[in-house]
Amino acid sequence: MEYAGSGTASALMLRNAPRLMAGYLAWLNRRRDNPRRHLLLAAALVAAWAITAALLIVTAQPATAAGLAWVYRHQFLLAGLAACTTAALVARRHATERSEAARSWLAALPVRRTAARWESLAIAAAPALGVIFIVAAAGGTAWMWSLFASDPAQGALAPTWLAVTAGVVAGAMTGYLVPAQKPTEVAPGSRYVPRPRVLGARPPAPSLSALGQWPVRQMFASARPKAVSRAVLPILLTIPLGSTAGAAMLDIAMCAVLGAVLLLVSAITRVSRQSARWLQPLPLPRALLARRLLVRPLAVIVAAALIAAWLLWVMGSPPTQALKYGFSLLVVSSLVAVMGSAAAISRTRAGPR
Amino acid sequence: MEIRGLRAGYGTRVIIDEISLALEAGEWFALMGPNGSGKTTLLDCVVGRLAVARGEVRIAGCSLIEDPLGAKRQLGYACAPESLPGLLTARQCLEVHAGAKGLSSVDAELLQFADELQFLPYLESFVDTLSLGTRQKLSILLCLLGDPKLIVLDEAFNALDPRSALVVKRHLRLRLEHSGAAVLMATHALDIVEHHADRAGLLMDGRIQREWLQQEIAELRLKGTGFEAALAQSMPQ
């Protein structure tokens, strides 16, 4: 069978690896739909890298020299860190890849065992390639700087780069070899949502109030326990050593409030789109839908802003400053929520599927 | 319901063109056609989910373009089960639909129908914990809220067990006889066309190519070849 891209060398190489082939063809299709987007993205990335490199070279010479000297001295530490990070990324991706492969639409295809193993390695180790690319870009920048500044320690750059790259490769292999966990079923989103109270056996009464509960429930559904526990770890790492338990609790509480607001704002936009689509065949004016969707979440945002201001005050900020920050949080998040909801509702109405 | 000279599509691609169709009160119209022939597109236009490029849709005398709220008050649409909101309970879905239709209460007849469908035990469950068939029942219940004059169903019997499907078919027939509603239904199920529909249409190449009345369908069924063969003959290779 002939199809777009089937004759290319890449397609021929991937002929025995159906999942990679499917991914490659999907990438080709996306590029065909919007060919300039990839070029623009690549150009933007190169430009951002060039500007950063130029700024480092021209404006921050002493700081850059000190930074590079630190890198040379701690190359094995950096290699270890790169290895750990890559191992975690690859192990996680490999676990996801394994569970998805079993349910994939390509799962029943006869693929040779060696080909399947290579395919699995290629999919799982993709983040390692990204890390190698970033390390290479950083190494290239440092090399340009060392040439420009005639850095005496220029010779240490290549071993450092090699050590970090070797760390990434070792981490990728280790991550790939981590044994699989027990497979778990993906839980429905409502598992993490507080259950509504059931007040006896009463018939349903017409009401739009459930629309306001929906974004709040979506917020709870997004904040699954695993995601929350992962989010808490970096917060704990940012708390300096020697902090008191009280200060740490305040930091965690503040992050929880800000995280909840962030999740709620994104939930409002998402739910607005879904509800507008669901209720499209009903005689419900847009303004009424938006109002019903927004009133309760905005009340939650007001409460969150008040709690944030109170936390800031407890942390030692002057009351006026704490109120100012709380008010800013309220205004910014409310504006984003209202605009996101309005845009989602107006875009969904009477449009294509 | 009346559709006149309807044209619709996605972007520059025209899917249905010059569709004209009128449904009388109490009539059950089955819309058939090959996959991708535009059945769902036509239903999307009728319920206002897709903007039409040309033509007009009128429901109980109200134009869907000029008076969309008036037209939608007369409309019941069973959406795809996967479009139902997973984080609301079945009760809340019913309440929101009833609220949006401006009803003062959920009618007892519908609750009795829900009981017949053995749906009431799931009233307090979140939609994303319901099975596909139970979601399909909820979708049909939402469609029938508020005694709509036009009931639009898009392959709504697909996930239902035979007993529930029979309950729904009997209930629809009762509604057609007593409340003067009309049913517009896209389906591939020939048993519905042969036993329940008053009229059937074949949508192909963006147009309704052929129509059969109930009497013709019955005659074809009695002949040796049957309606299935007649339908296959109407679809060129």
Image (tube, grey):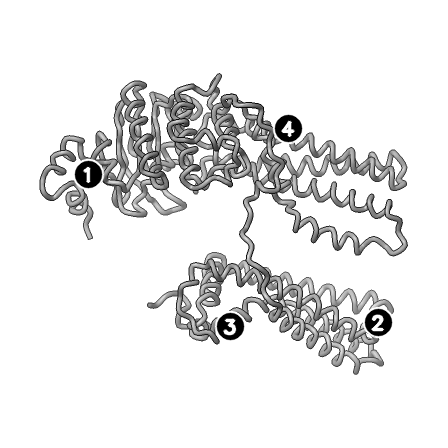
Q: Amino acid at mark 3?
A: Arg
Q: Name the spot of residue A173 as percent of width and height, x first.
A: 63, 73
Pointers 1 and 2 within a single chain: no
Rendered location of residue A152, percent (x, y): 85, 81
Q: Which residue is mark 1?
A: B210
The amino acid type, in three-letter code, at marker 2 is Trp
Q: Residue furthest left?
A: B223
Which one is in front, B184 or B6?
B184
Establish whether labels 2 and 3 are both on one chain. yes
User: Looking at this view, is B124 or A331 the one in front?
Assistant: B124
Q: Which secondary structure lies at badge 2?
A: helix
Q: Which residue is mark 3?
A: A117
Q: Are marks 1 and 3 in contact (CB under 8 Å)?
A: no
3D distance between C-alphas at marks 3 and 4: 53 Å
Residue on which disc 2 sits: A70
Q: Is residue B155 visible?
A: no
Q: Chain of mark 4?
A: A
Quadrant housing residue A221: top right
Asked if A277 appears above or below B34 in the picture, the reply is above
Residue A295: numbered disc: 4
Question: Dot 2, how many residues are within 10 Å of its Cα: few (below 14), some (14-19), or many (20+)?
Answer: few
Chain under numbered label 1? B
